[in-house]
Amino acid sequence: MKDTTLSSTHEALGAKMVPFAGYNMPVQYEGVNIEHETVRTSVGVFDVSHMGEFLIEGPHALELIQNVSSNDASKLEIGKAQYSCLPNDDGGVVDDLIIYKLKEETYLLVVNASNIEKDWNWISSKNDVGAEMRDLSEAYSLLAIQGPKAVEAMQSITSHDLSAIKFYNFVVGDFAGVENVIISATGYTGSGGFEIYCKNTEVKQIWDKVFEAGADFGIKPIGLAARDTLRLEMGYCLYGNDIDDTTSPIEAGLGWVCKFNKDFTNSDALKAEKEHTPENKLVAFKLDERGVPRHGYDIVDSSGKTIGKVTSGTMSPSLGIGIGMGYVPTVFSKVDSKIFIQVRKKAIPATVVKAPFYKG
């Protein structure tokens, strides 16, 4: 099992550490609900240094990225980022990712920790155009500073106007006394904030200065458990739960990142699927009665017939009700459709809703 540079720091803070994607990671410090509320109301910091970073460079960098990713990376300008996915040849998804345009002919691809090796091998297998590829994952750290007070709390440790960085835009500059840091207005919580990319040798200094700067704003370290409840309240997909090698991006509601004005891996089949409506769709649902839906629970219809599975589920800390996502036949996917979640021996009624669950 690998440690991040900050693993000992988390342990010293009393974090409960768990294995996650091959890394020793903090799952919680004070408790999921407290940490969740901190991010929704003030500012919290996640160590997500287990994520993978690939640098794709050279005159053929864009050509490779356009081939392997579903979104249209030609639309990216320097200083902008884009959410996308890597379709496989069989209708599923290799991974979802964020693509950053750092310079002309230089892109940073940020991938899920559990998929680093798989993604690298997949992209390499498609690189018949000679793009330069470098795996920076082992050398770089990533902090997510999230919450409505993130801008105000962090402004004192950078010369950049943080309030001027729009969503899915970034700057490269000084942060916490370190130069050439990527300050990106991205994150997976739905409460605003930044993601900070730096070298492993710099992350402890940045972590310490971030907590000094945020002290008056109630800043706290946040574990992966709250990261999961925060992203689920926004209806964001988690790779391995809601999307994987067998789920179609069209079924998963990711048709908006599939741009059919270009050719990419399996684009013809995905375009046909979008035009003819997929058999199943990923839906968001709220329980109508008390209960907690969990990953793997059956979704059933009014007669008790199994029609799908819960892919993500939790008791929403913000809403105080059971929420989740899962795949159901398209006929059950309309908003206000009634479905049932099999929680042990009881089929609890639920209503299909439009994500996000949390509207801030």
Image (spheres, grey):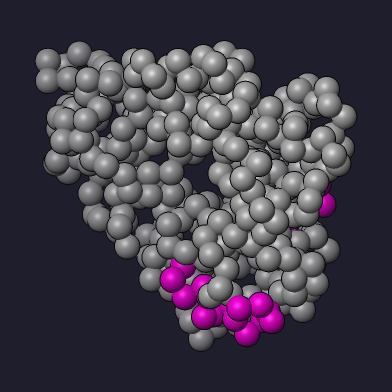
Q: Position of residue 261 (x, y in %)?
A: 55, 29
Query: Is residue 1 placed above or below 101 in the rendered structure?
Result: above
157 part of magenta stretch = yes
Residue 35 quadrant? bottom left
* Residue found at x 53% / y 65%: 166
Q: Quadrant of the C terminus?
A: bottom left
Residue 74 quadrant? top right
* Residue found at x 82% / y 35%: 60
Residue 324 quadrant? top left
Viewer-proximal residue, 158 or 161? 161
Query: Is residue 209 placed above or below 186 in the rendered structure?
Result: below
Can residue 187 be seen here? yes
Write the start and end of the magenta stretch as one range. 135-161
Position of residue 156 in the picture relative to residue 206 (left or right): left
Image mark count: 0
Q: Position of residue 94 (x, y in %)?
A: 61, 26
